[in-house]
Amino acid sequence: MKATIGIVCSSALLGLSALAQGQAPAAPGQPVPTALTIDQAVDEALRNNLDLLAEKQNVPVARAREITAALRPNPTLSFTWDYLDWLRRGLTPQNSAGPSEFSPQFNYIWERGGKRERRIDLATVVTSIAELRLLDTMRQLGLAVRLAGVDFLLARENADLAQQNLNVFNDIVRVNEAKVHAGDLAGVELIRTRVAQQQLQNAVAQAQLKLQTARNTIQQLLGRNARMAGFEITGSLRSDDTVLLLDEMKKQALEQRPDLLATRKDTDRAKADTNLQLANGKPDLTTGLLYHNQYGYSNGRTFGVFLSIPLPVYDRNQGEIARAQREMTQTQYRVKALENAISTEVENTWQQYTTAKALLDRIRGDLLSQARQVRDITEFSYRRGEASLLEFLDAQRTYNDTMQSYNDARADYTRSLFLIDAATGKSVNP
């Protein structure tokens, strides 16, 4: 499993090297596309989404901490000028109060226990975790854009359906108006059709509102500041007939999900932190070199060597060592909890997929064609005066409900496919 994590981390590092620096949006003079496919929308979101742009900075921040971790302690240089006769007491060699002297001293701390190497190890693991967290953010953003694209396509399908129903009743109203003027139809029948027409007009307005809301939502995910009224998602809802095995999906998720890989990597981070705290418990050596010069003596130039080491009598970094060890145990439990949660998520997603597929197959069979046929026959009969308005409205309502269910089933099926890609980590597999 560690080999798999290493491969994914290195692949993610190569694949995200440009993204980690934060690609800039389109140039001011470059036209912004008004129509995108769902895949193109995901690509634009990965470039321009504001939340993702902020998340991308975590990678260079972690790399900057690697630089800090590799730095060695700075040497120190101190200068002492002593025995100065500022009080005019007459400092001479004879009274042993002088002469004045100066002493430059050079000190350096020698880190023991491999502290620098342990810091580098910890910072490197933290960078790998930041890359995986970024990859998981991209997974979640890609899923959000895809689902928003499905919502837009569904809203457009429903708006078109509502407009088609309104067009049918507009024609019915015109026919009935002509019949009333000719005396072939009672006026109350015309009123009934106009009431039904107004209800369909309300349905069209509501469908257009949902469409505009979906349009604004997906443009926000794309990172666009200005909302384009004519923005469109092109293409259609997914209809690929895919056979998916639950056990295979769980296996893929446990191998590919970047959030799980990051949590597993967090165990390595806790281990590296424990090693660092153990190293910090070992006292460092401080060595110094002193040059001593006395005024008034031809041979008053001497050197001194200093060595200083703290005695670890009380503080041996026991608290931080215990804290790091407990965090290592904590991360192991978190890995198991996340693995369990991912398995449940994959199973729920698979259940949603199988249910949506079965529902879509039932509606896509004879039900849809039969509802359309009944509606067309009833409309033809109503125009000829052989069916009542209530019969026509009932047939129209049945057809509309069937088409609405068909659109919802197609959207649910498409959502389930996108959810499976995200749940298994397939959508961001390097």
Image: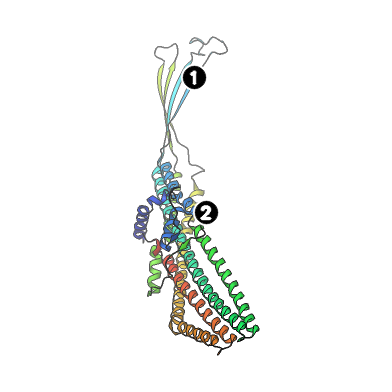
Under tag 1, what secondary structure?
A: strand
Question: CA separation, marks 2 and 1?
Answer: 68 Å
Taking the view exactly as shown, the residue that stands out farthest to the bottom is 386
Label 2 sits on what residue type? Ala
Residue 217 screen position, x and y as percent: 52, 61
Q: Residue 337: x percent and y percent?
A: 48, 65
Local crowd at mark 2 within 10 Å, few (<14), some, or many (≥20)?
Answer: few
Along the line of sight, the residue nearer the viewer: 153 or 293: 153
Instruction: Give residue 35's quadrant in the image.
Output: bottom left
User: Residue at 45% across / 36% down in the picture?
Assistant: 309
Name the residue tied to disc 2: 226
Q: Establish if 303 lies above or below 195.
A: above
Residue 40, percent from left and from top: 41, 60
Q: In the picture, residue 208 is in which quadrant?
A: bottom right
Which residue appears farthest toward the front when viewing the image? Answer: 182
Q: Quadrant of the N terminus?
A: bottom left
User: Looking at the picture, does residue 285 appear above or below residue 214?
Assistant: above
Residue lying at 65% horizontally and 83% vertically, measured from the top left? 187
SS at circle 2? loop
Q: Residue 81 carries which label?
A: 1
Q: Residue at x 56, y 88 (%)?
A: 385
Q: Where is residue 72 in the image (x, y as percent from the top left)?
A: 41, 38
**Foreground tag (2 vs 1):** 2
Q: Of 339 and 376, which appears nearest the observer? A: 376
Give the residue type at disc 1. Trp
